[in-house]
Image (cartoon, helix red, strand yellow):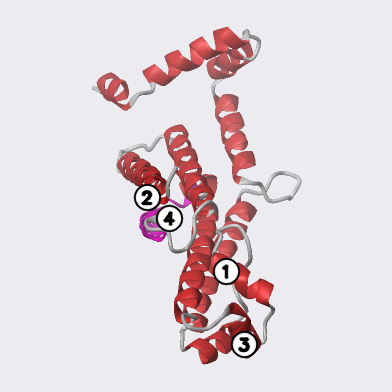
Amino acid sequence: MDQAVHSRTHLAQLNDLEARVTRALAATHDELATEQPSLPELLELDSEIAGCVQDVLGLGSQLRPSSPGWSETAANVWKGLEGLFNMIAVEHPDIDRALGLDEQLQELILASTRWNVAVTVSTARAGKTVREVANEVGMSIGYLSELEGGKPRSVGLPSPGMCTKIDNALGTDLRTRVGDARAKIAALEEHARRRRSSAASTTGQPLTSFEFRLQIVADTMGRDVQLLAFVERFVLLSDSARRGVEKLVEELSSSDQRSALIR
């Protein structure tokens, strides 16, 4: 497959991922606007968003920083996810505890900033070899090459001191951009810590998002004997029977049918 076909394929994949995230974000906003938002529905949408984010990061790992489309897609997903995260944190703190939007945002910001560093350094280095810049900055050739690689899941962000050296050598402004990203990531890490702490288990250990979801299900079944009996019967079914029940539940839970039932 030639480079042009590769680029078109990746752009199509990125466009599809961005469209999926946009739909999931819109559906989440719509669900939150209802009189009684459905937590199971929101958790399903949260999983869809998380899957899309991981797919965006995975695709970024296959591309070069010079490849078109990835940084734009990541920036658009970041913007939409950040808006939803801020709204839920303020207006729906109980729901915020169950979702992992802060974790997805951290990964997106880190990956996007790595990519931005790669593009900035490789562009500013034009006319100089990697060895020349590495010697001028005072870093290893391998580390500079990793920075220019920009893989979302590879090397971390350069330190403030290293950013300053790169800025002085290449006339860039990495210290400000990387510093802003670090501050956002730190705030999200603190939010995630508080979120997990507020959902602490009886053992006093913070719960992960998955464990908190299990707790919600358990609490719900504890208040609904019929639901508990249904789950007990469900786990005893054969794999094929389970799939049939899951399909039926999915159909009954579709937004159109739920609206019809409410009416």
Q: Looking at the picture, which amino acid does disc 4 mark? A: Phe
Q: Are marks 4 and 2 in contact (CB under 8 Å)?
A: no
Q: Looking at the picture, which amino acid does disc 2 mark? A: Ala
Label the magenta part by its dominant secondary structure. helix
Q: Which mark is residue 4?
A: 2
| Distance from Cα at disc 1 to Cα at disc 4 | 15 Å
> Which residue is labeled 1 in the image?
186
> Which residue is labeled 4 in the image?
85
- Report x, y in % for residue 195: 57, 54
Decide: few, some or many residues near mark 4? Use Cα within 10 Å; few <14, some 14-19, many ≥20.
some
Residue located 68% across and 51% down the image: 206
Of badges 1 and 2, nearer the viewer stands: 2
Q: Are marks 3 and 2 in contact (CB under 8 Å)?
A: no
Of marks 3 and 1, which one's residue comes earlier in the chain? 3
Of marks 1 and 4, which one's residue comes earlier in the chain? 4
Q: Looking at the picture, which amino acid does disc 1 mark? A: Ala
Of marks 4 and 2, which one's residue comes earlier in the chain? 2
Q: Mark 1: which secondary structure? A: helix
| Distance from Cα at disc 4 to Cα at disc 2 | 37 Å
Per the image, is 81 magenta? yes
Q: Which residues are magenta?
A: 70-94
- Report x, y in % for residue 88: 41, 53
Decide: few, some or many residues near mark 1? Use Cα within 10 Å; few <14, some 14-19, many ≥20.
few
- Report x, y in % for residue 180: 48, 76
Of marks 1 and 2, which one's residue comes earlier in the chain? 2
Could you tell me if residue 184 is visible in this image? Answer: no
> Which residue is labeled 3 in the image?
137
Left/right placement of residue 100 relative to residue 262 reads: right
Q: Mark 2: which secondary structure? A: helix
Residue located 59% across and 45% down the image: 209
Of marks 3 and 2, which one's residue comes earlier in the chain? 2
| Distance from Cα at disc 4 to Cα at disc 3 | 38 Å
